[in-house]
Image (cartoon, rainbow, N blue to C red):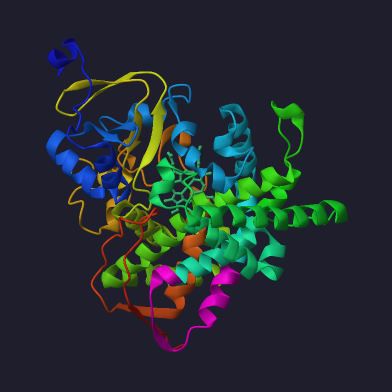
Amino acid sequence: RVLFNLLPSKRPPVWEGLPFIGGLLKFTGGPWKLLENGYAKFGECFTVPVAHRRVTFLIGPEVSPHFFKAGDDEMSQSEVYDFNIPTFGRGVVFDVEQKVRTEQFRMFTEALTKNRLKSYVPHFNKEAEEYFAKWGETGVVDFKDEFSKLITLTAARTLLGREVREQLFDEVADLLHGLDEGMVPLSVFFPYAPIPVHFKRDRCRKDLAAIFAKIIRARRESGRREEDVLQQFIDARYQNVNGGRALTEEEITGLLIAVLFAGQHTSSITTSWTGIFMAANKEHYNKAAEEQQDIIRKFGNELSFETLSEMEVLHRNITEALRMHPPLLLVMRYAKKPFSVTTSTGKSYVIPKGDVVAASPNFSHMLPQCFNNPKAYDPDRFAPPREEQNKPYAFIGFGAGRHACIGQNFAYLQIKSIWSVLLRNFEFELLDPVPEADYESMVIGPKPCRVRYTRRKL
Ligand code: HEM
């Protein structure tokens, strides 16, 4: 390795022969195969020409520290995530300078303090209990559909606010669906392409802005305050930019959409995989159900921030489901400066300025050098001393470093709440084999899978 480091560094190998459109199709038609073939051919670091860009993949913990650690002046997000601007709107997140974005995320982080999280837990529980109360004694469901509906309800209540949950839910859910449909793989490279789903996206975005402007104005005028993320944004003020002013209605709408996009599908998919794997591995389901009974014996029936935090077995199942199937296939940056990486076999490369750089949680989580027997579902791999989880940049389901997920605690609490209600009240049986991941969707979830639920006899 020392010898290799003394040799002049060179650019990563380029996957030649993929024409402009060929690369684009391979990328947008599900980049999993592209990654799989590229890794087999070139190893941990390689470049693929995709449309008008060069995408360099960094696979595994040896080559990814710079990606996760570097400042935004070196590894930038705006240039690669700016396809979100028509969805999130102007003046927020990827449409603003880094220092403004940092303040906007700081405002969101203030909605996720321990005390704030505590106040969301009763809403998670209430929504979950009401939702599953509607299930019969026994029936067949697809987790992905069920959790997607439930998490739209919890997100509406805790993020978008009481008014949306109680009065405007169907209307807002439809508009959000229109935004979702407007995010297709082509949008990543051509977010303004004149296609019908983009036109619909733009109409829905406009209607959402009008709805939120009304709600915000009504709250500001009445002085009424609620415990939700919307309230946090209404109360927040910039500190070191924009003259210390409050957020505009348009900015608040944009930030709400952004956090919803970051948290909704990722959470509902992870809730689904957690259930699928526990149902397929009865011993883990039973252990998690026993843990619920222990918690009830010790603390009573109430689900609170404190009792949810005690659930280590359930926590490990969620983490392992996320390791097996992270919903975000790629996280990306734009290299504003060249940087070098050294692979585990000692090859050194310089990634040039201007490359799009991508790391893949899915792919990294399946590397045997990071996780023993990576294809096996084994939540106990995360039991203390948690060696596998603690290997730097091995577990990256929530990203890592500078831009690691800020909604992680919110996500765990929400998923634990839902699964606590289910583990206490139902048994499950998979009627199909454990499904494959649907790598063709933007956020990667399970393909359809039928599950039979049976209500426990009390
Ligand atoms: C960032 C995954 C839930 C808000 C990220 C990143 C990943 C991730 C991989 C890093 C992206 C990157 O490096 O480019 C997940 C998963 C979740 C989840 C798997 C659920 C299981 C949530 C929730 C929220 C949220 C519930 C909000 C309520 C955010 C935000 C960022 C982020 C705002 C951007 C942080 C930054 O750029 O500094 N998430 N997330 N996430 N997540 Fe999550």
Q: Is residue 39 on the magenta stretch?
A: no
Q: Is residue 186 left or right of residue 439?
A: right
Residue shown at 55%/45% (left/top)? 86
Residue shown at 58%/70% (left/top)? 127
Instruction: Evaluate whether residue 44 shows in this view.
Output: yes
Residue shown at 44%/55% (left/top)? 266
Image coords of residue 332 (percent x, y) = 39, 37
Image coords of residue 404 (percent x, y) = 45, 39
Q: Is residue 47 left or right of residue 95?
A: left
Image coords of residue 144 (percent x, y) = 40, 68
Q: Is residue 138 on the magenta stretch?
A: yes
Q: Where on the picture, by quarter, is residue 18?
A: top left
Instruction: Evaluate whether residue 309 shows in this view.
Output: no
Magenta part of the chain? 125-145
Q: Is residue 110 left or right of residue 310?
A: right
* Residue 91 against residue 302 in the figure, above or below: above
